[in-house]
Image (cartoon, rainbow, N blue to C red):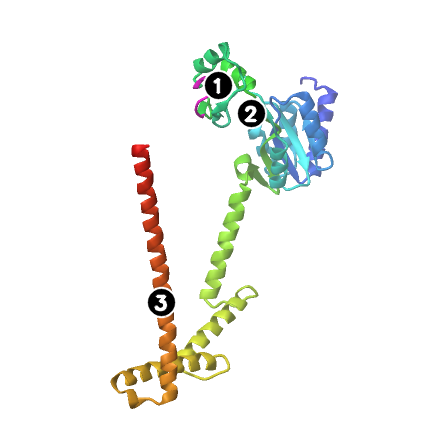
Amino acid sequence: MPHVAQWKKDEVKNLKNLIEKYPVVGMANLSDIPAPQLQKMRQSLRGNAELKMSRKTLMDLALNESKKTKVEILVEHMEGQPALIFTDMNPFKLYKILESSKTPAPARAGSIATSNIVVPKGETGFMPGPILGELQRIGIPAKIEKGKIVITEDKTIVAEGEEIPKDVASMLTRLEIYPLEVGINLRAAYEDKTIYTSDILFIDDDKTLSDIENAYSRAFNLSVNGMVYNKISTPALITKAAGQSLNLALNAEILTSKTTTTLLAKAYSQMLFLASEASANNAEAVDEEIQEKLSSKAKKAKAIISDEEKEEEKEKEEKEEEKEGEAAAGLGALFG
């Protein structure tokens, strides 16, 4: 039986203790993270999570020997330079913290683009020289304008999933375009016999908020239309009922403190209409008081019409003056 170094046994034991101690265990990939930035990330996690790097075989043993059900599935998510993260935070919060701590990084030759790398149009700040040819050779549309090299249109120089060529990586750095991100990539996390992969842990905050707002709006409409009473729908249902009862009272001509003023105004208007019809057939059909009211109403209507006609006449004159001005300007240009 081969001899196993004591430090390896101690390391596996330590990892197993951490797995048992914390409710959430994450599997991360630390590939391509410079040592200074990794140190800063460790410090940012202090007090919230514990990051532990070790050999793959030792992490594999610790996870498989753990008493926690299904935690060993994390072994399937070992990638690059793996590390275990131990925390009391729920996996979604841990993922969000790790993603927000990522920083832009320059392109590296041979790296895979995680999204389309676009060079935007605009001035480069470079003076005319050999760099113009270098830009054009890698497919970036550029020319000289006003003594400077200008990129004439947005250009996707590397598509998502493609490898970044050496000359492209160098040019992106010179253009101060940093398309990559450096940070701890949480590949999966274990909590309460469940494995959450990174695609599940990613949450679009704006979309989630929009979905919640839409769900709230639909639930509110459903409760109001279905007459389901709760603390949110009750005020709206009471307002709706009050409006319907007022319309019913007005249509049925039921006098109440809410309808009397409206109904009297309606009756008064109908009375004047009938009086006007009767007066048109026989001037003596209505008394002097009603005649005065009809005359006053007619004068007001005539005044309104007169004001509208004056406004139309004013607009017509202004248009004619504009035409005369344009004609004069045309003649001046012809003979000037």
What residue did someone put label 3 on? 306
**Marker count (numbered):** 3
Residue 57 occupies quadrant: top right
Magenta-highlighted residues: 141-154
Q: Quadrant of the C terminus?
A: top left
Q: Quadrant of the N terminus?
A: top right
* Distance Cα–Cα, label 2 vs label 3: 72 Å
**Comparing labels 2 and 3, the label whose residue is closer to the camera:** 3
- Mark 2 or 3, nearer chain start: 2
What residue did someone put label 2 on? 180
Q: Position of residue 203 (x, y in %)?
A: 54, 41
Q: Position of residue 297 (x, y in %)?
A: 38, 77
Return the residue nearer the eye: 279 or 20.
279
* Distance Cα–Cα, label 3 vs label 1: 63 Å
Does residue 27 appear left or right of residue 148 in this picture?
right
What residue did someone put label 1 on? 146
Q: What amino acid is at disc 2?
A: Leu
Q: Which mark is residue 220?
A: none
Going 51% across and 44% down the picture, which residue do you hit? 207
